[in-house]
Image: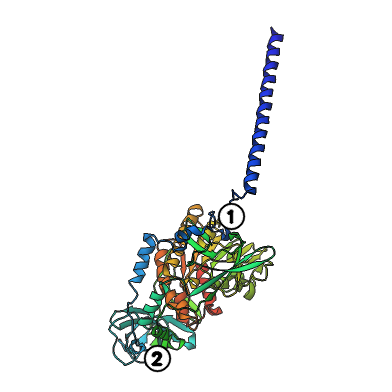
Amino acid sequence: MIPTLINAKEHEQETLALCKMKLSLRLVVIVAVVTTIVFFAFSQKKMQVPKMNILQLCDCQPQTDSSDIESIAEPMETDDEIEDLFNEIDGLIPRVSIDNWQKATSAEKTNLTVVNPKDNYCVGDLLLVRVNACDYSGAPKTYGGDYLRARIYSPSTNSSASGSIQDYNNGTYLVKFTLFWEGTVHISIVLMHPSEAASALWRGRNQGFANIKYTGNFTSATSYVNSECGFYLDTQEEVCAYIDKRDKEAFFCMKPENYPCEALTHMNSVNRDHSYLAEVEQLLLNRSNIGLEISKPLKPVKVTSCGKKLKEPTKKCSTGSNYPIPSGYFSYNVWKPIHCKMTQFTDNDKLKDFLKGKKLFLLGDSTVRQYIRHFAENIKIVDYFNHTEDEMQSWQKTLLAINLEKFIYVQWKKHTFPFVSKTFYSIKEDAYMARQIDQIGGGENTIIVLTLGQHFRPFPFRTFIRSALNVRRAIERLFIRSPRTRVIIKEENARDMDIGAERFSDFHGYVQYLALREIFKGLNVGFVDGLDMTIAYACNVIHPPLEVLENLISMSFTQVS
């Protein structure tokens, strides 16, 4: 019986092996047939290899079917959240128009009056100034909406502060200054734009995308071609559509003949010879009519201690709070927040000790690029990693700097569209800021400082709102996976007054400043009020001077230290 059982088992094993061999042969035949069919299909161009989307926007494919142009070229519909915020800001903007520039607010004819005059003020007192706006004929204005700036300053101590401005919407404004220091204090109230210009700027901005022209560079191994690009292309021709389906952000280029959409490698932009404004409105935006000191200056006031000292805050500045203008003041070129205490990070050793073992990600435009340049070029606490980019890659390239001894890692990376630059820049590694944040692991030794705004100014306001909301959601996702990551938002600073006011006026920056605070309200992030600092310091340049930059950096790091 035993030999019979063994033979039966051997027979069963042989049968099973034979079946496996037959199955393997069948699988080989099937694979060979499928491979032949796929190869034949590709050779007949009836199947396409899935395309990897350029710009790292998403995993969706570029749209190149001209029959679908109507469904993708129109600006995407905004959701209720975007529309609600747009309407909230829209309700703050004056609705006025004129056919004669002399009916606009005149800095020369406008009157200033000190409401609470004194021979001597005490430190901590309020100084109240009433502004009665008048037009060029001297007639009082009956509506508000003028874009004003107010500051006090003492050159002898390098002290300065912004003032808060209340608009009564009848041509009258009340400016409140807190007298933070002793000495002779000068008063400055500036008419940045009359209400008529502010109204025109808002209306023109939201009419379309035509003020900026984008050109994309498509390349191959042996040639290249330039093609028109933008947020909206009015065409029936074939286009490349670079769409982030999740975040509903989109950008388009005319598809060059014989180039795939993935061949887009570089981009530049220029101001188009175009305006949405009437001739009289453009006149109000000439440099000679921007940022005019109200020409009936007030006499300086005397401020003494009166036997008391201004109480300084003792609680360190931290994330989760933001404060209205004025949120602080300069004294001997050092920023003094009035609600919390700032630590100065101006000493090299102190900066290195703080950044030891940390990763610092700087996201946005060139105003946060100043941080890494200061660390690497001015105080030299980190060294640039060797960059060997092609010649078309200029200042916009990603910067990386490290300190091996202290294990410090600092990186700056620009946000993608909208990004405005006359010189061509590489977009091969570009991603929207929300996607960049998604790619950061985070952790207790990770700090993110971001800014967005300057490059959004020439485009409809909903474009900015959508991007900012997407960034908020990305930060919320970051906090879920890495709740100990620290995030700082550097708010927009003032910039030059003589560079294309219709496109880049600080008025656009101001409304974005208001919206950004609303969008990030309730999120545990830190705010650095670049607008308040630069108004107080009166530095009307896009890249603030070293004295301001050091305070921006100190305020950033104090909140995450």
Residue occupying image coordinates x 64% and y 74%: 377
Q: As rendered, which of 151 and 340 lies closer to the eye? A: 151
Residue occupying image coordinates x 67% and y 20%: 15
Q: Splitting the image into 4 quarters, where does residue 309 fall?
A: bottom left
Evaluate whether residue 122 shows in this view: yes
Q: As rendered, which of 376 and 116 lies closer to the eye? A: 376
Where 372 sits versus 98, above or below? above
On the rendered structure, is 71 left or right of 125? right
x, y percentage for residue 329? 44, 78
Dots 1 and 2: beta carbons under 8 Å? Answer: no
On the rendered structure, is 499 left or right of 519? right
Q: Residues within 10 Å of mark 2 (few under 14, many from 20)?
A: some
Q: Splitting the image into 4 quarters, where does residue 294 fall?
A: bottom left
Tag 2's secondary structure?
loop
Gap in Å between the C-alphas at discs 1 and 2? Answer: 64 Å
- For badge 1, the amino acid type reads Met
- For badge 2, the amino acid type reads Pro
Q: As rendered, which of 393 and 65 lies closer to the eye? A: 65
Where 321 sits versus 332, above or below? above
Q: Which residue is mark 2?
A: 300
Q: Which residue is mark 1?
A: 52
x, y percentage for residue 486? 51, 61
Q: Splitting the image into 4 quarters, where does residue 320 fall?
A: bottom left
**N-term-proximal mark, 1 vs 2:** 1
Residue most extreme to the top = 1
On the rendered structure, is 446 left or right of 72? right
Position of the N terminus by quadrant: top right
x, y percentage for residue 497? 48, 83
> How many numbered marks are there?
2
On the rendered structure, is 337 left or right of 109? right
Q: Residues within 10 Å of mark 1 (few under 14, many from 20)?
A: some
x, y percentage for residue 389? 67, 67
